[in-house]
Image: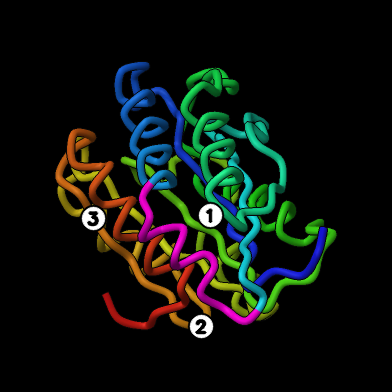
Amino acid sequence: MDPVDVALCLAMDVSASVDFDEFALMAGGTAAALRDPGVLAAATSGPRRAAALCLLLWSGTGAQDVALGWTRLDGPDAAAAIAEAIETTPRLPPPGATALGEGMAAGLALLARFSGEATRLVMDVSGDGRHNQGRAPAPMRDLAVAAGLTINGLAILNEEPDLLAHYAEEVIGGPGSFAMSCADYDDFAEAILRKLRRELSGALVA
């Protein structure tokens, strides 16, 4: 793959607290965001005029699947193809516990295996619950920070109204990192749109 400005791993919670309708809202909302001209403009705003994206679905320990491998985002056709792939992806891992740290570890491994050259390496974690199985998230965050990576978070508050604090304290880290929240899955599409615009452009403010 030719060099890109940012390699972004989308790490999406599909644990038992996320039902199939909610997963469809997450996948559909992410696809809609990728069809937004503002997201494409952000992805192509850097000197290399391109980003690379992948999609990781995670639930319990040992239950992580790559739904979309590393794909270059450099124009409308690529954006449309990535959006279609995400919108139609099956819910691959079985529902289980919320192994947030394990999901983060899998995302970091994907970033470490990125075969291209990227100015920034970023993981985007979306979920609706605290870590409750496997490795804790904070040590995974610390590894990412030590390696110069950035982890951002989108906390969905329908199950745990104070989840944003958990993401802020134990999940996010690295240059320009931030955590956002949305009240429910119905609000996910608008939140992920704002999040992707910010992540792909590298903006440090909302």
Q: Which residue is mark 3?
A: 181
- Determine the image quadrant of residue 154: bottom left
Within 10 angstroms of label 3, few (less than 14), some, or many (20 or more) residues? many
Horizontal side, residue 18 vs residue 165: left or right: right
Which quadrant holds the N terminus? bottom right
Dots 2, 3 in contact, CB < 8 A: no
Q: How is the image coloured?
A: rainbow
Residues under labels 2 and 3: Cα distance? 19 Å
Type of amino acid at the residue the image marks with label 1: Ala
Magenta-highlighted residues? 36-47
Q: Amino acid at mark 2?
A: Pro
Identify the image quadrant of residue 165.
bottom left
Q: Position of residue 196 (x, y in %)?
A: 40, 59
Mark 1 to mark 3 CA distance (whole Å)? 21 Å
Q: Which residue is at a point 36% across and 60% down the rendered structure image? A: 38
Disc marking residue 175: 2
Question: Which secondary structure lies at badge 2?
Answer: loop
Q: Is residue 171 above or below residue 33?
A: below
Specify the amino acid type for callout 3: Ser
Q: Quadrant of residue 181?
A: bottom left
Q: Residue at x 51, y 74 (%)?
A: 45
- As drawn, the label of residue 136 is 1
